[in-house]
Amino acid sequence: MAAGEVSGRGPRERMVFSAVQLMRRGGVGATGMRDVVAHARAPRGSLQHYFPGGKEQLVNEAVEWAGRYAAGQVARFVAAMAEPTPSGLFAAMVRQWTDELETPDAGSGCPVAAAVIDCAEDSESTRTATAAAFAAWTGPVAQALTDMNVPTARAEALAMLMVSTVEGALLMARAERDVRALKTAARELGPLLDGAVGTGSTVDRA
Amino acid sequence: MAAGEVSGRGPRERMVFSAVQLMRRGGVGATGMRDVVAHARAPRGSLQHYFPGGKEQLVNEAVEWAGRYAAGQVARFVAAMAEPTPSGLFAAMVRQWTDELETPDAGSGCPVAAAVIDCAEDSESTRTATAAAFAAWTGPVAQALTDMNVPTARAEALAMLMVSTVEGALLMARAERDVRALKTAARELGPLLDGAVGTGSTVDRA
DNA sequence: CCGCTACTATGACAGCTGTCATAGACGGCT
DNA sequence: AGCCGTCTATGACAGCTGTCATAGTAGCGG
């Protein structure tokens, strides 16, 4: 995602990756198959070979890729934190997007969000893929929260809230061409998240 | 929005409204001009008459319409609440979307989000329109919060957080075809919002 | 050498897109 | 009547879409 290179391994993976990048900036509708092969420097004939399911398959794989990527990033964030806190994890998730928004060149939206908005209504398989991607993203977040001593049920709810808020704030940030929506989300939500460690109640031992 | 009828006044307004509805379900790319006039039962020739700016103008007006609509809804929510609380307002905003999601027929996304994802990157005017729509939405929310005794600066931040979270949760709810993302957002964010009435600091006097 | 599989190349297809040019209808003026 | 501004009708345009059919190349095992 952050890496702009398309020199990944095979042509197949490059095409999926390029689909992700193009979907991020213009949505699914504006992402043509010819654009994908051109962006991936892949042979056009490989399209119908690797993706006999057509555009739908390509989009679905792009969404799955994004879900795996997000999960991996969460794992990296928690691994990199000296003393893990919920607010710290959330701040790291937010920072990822603010960094990408501040690089002026490439599109900086979420490919999963694009797939939801453009395809959720008329492609059931894509809708399922987006739901799976969100689950792949939310899962590690919830796991990290429980590891930080947040009760399981609460951790899952808060993980969902975190992903929802990041996704929505990213939308507003793109509209305003300003990261303040993301930053205020991190600032306002941080205390709430940290307040959930320990017992499930809102006990706060200053 | 909730009203599915297109029998609004003039053909012009019907077309804008139809554009909103079609953008909600398939995004901007999947919303053709011919689809709009058909959905609005409007004469095709009226397109280039009322919208000489082409599709871009139509989309922009649809986004503006949505912003005004959202602002009006917020006003109605606060007016309808016996004893207004931040969590109550947020719950009302969430309920609006859960209600629309549970009506199975029509598309149920946010047209502003669709415009951001599909057009923000290559149409500056549309991007501006989406920013204005979010401002039109956030403004009354912040105003309502200050009326509930939330300090001004904090109210603006929380209003932004509320809209962000609703927008993101709606995205997840569409992906999962389940309103639980919206409901957990309301449940988890409610106490935080109510905790902000009174002094602006994050002091929490259990 | 054959045959086989994996991959690539290329051109064509019908269908749809937004946009425009042109012409017509309607109603209210003076 | 004539004229005009507002609105509508219709057909065409070039461009792009995803998909497919067909043919071709490379490499490898036999």
Image (cartoon, coloured by chain):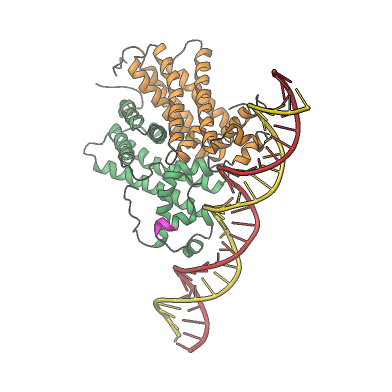
Chain colours: A green, B orange, C red, D yellow
The secondary structure making up most of the magenta span is helix
Is residue A40 within the magenta segment? yes
The structure residue drawn at horizontal position 62% and vertical position 29%, both measured from the top left corner, is B12
Query: Which of these two is toward me, B98 or A84?
Result: B98
Q: Residue at x 42, y 55 (%)?
A: A16
Question: In the image, residue B106 lies at what x, y percent?
Answer: 61, 35
Residue B133 vertical placement versus B195 (above, below): below
Instruction: Give coordinates of residue B40: x percent, y percent.
Output: 65, 33
User: Quadrant of the rendered structure where residue B58 is?
Assistant: top right
Find the magenta span and give its range: A37-41
Q: Residue B172: percent from the left, percent from the top? A: 47, 37
Q: Quadrant of residue C20?
A: top right
Note whether residue B104 is visible.
Answer: no
> For residue A65: magenta?
no
Look at the image and tell me in which quarter the C terminus of chain A lies.
top left
Q: Position of residue B36 (x, y in %)?
A: 62, 37
Q: Residue furthest left?
A: A82
Q: Nearer the viewer, residue A33 or A112?
A: A33
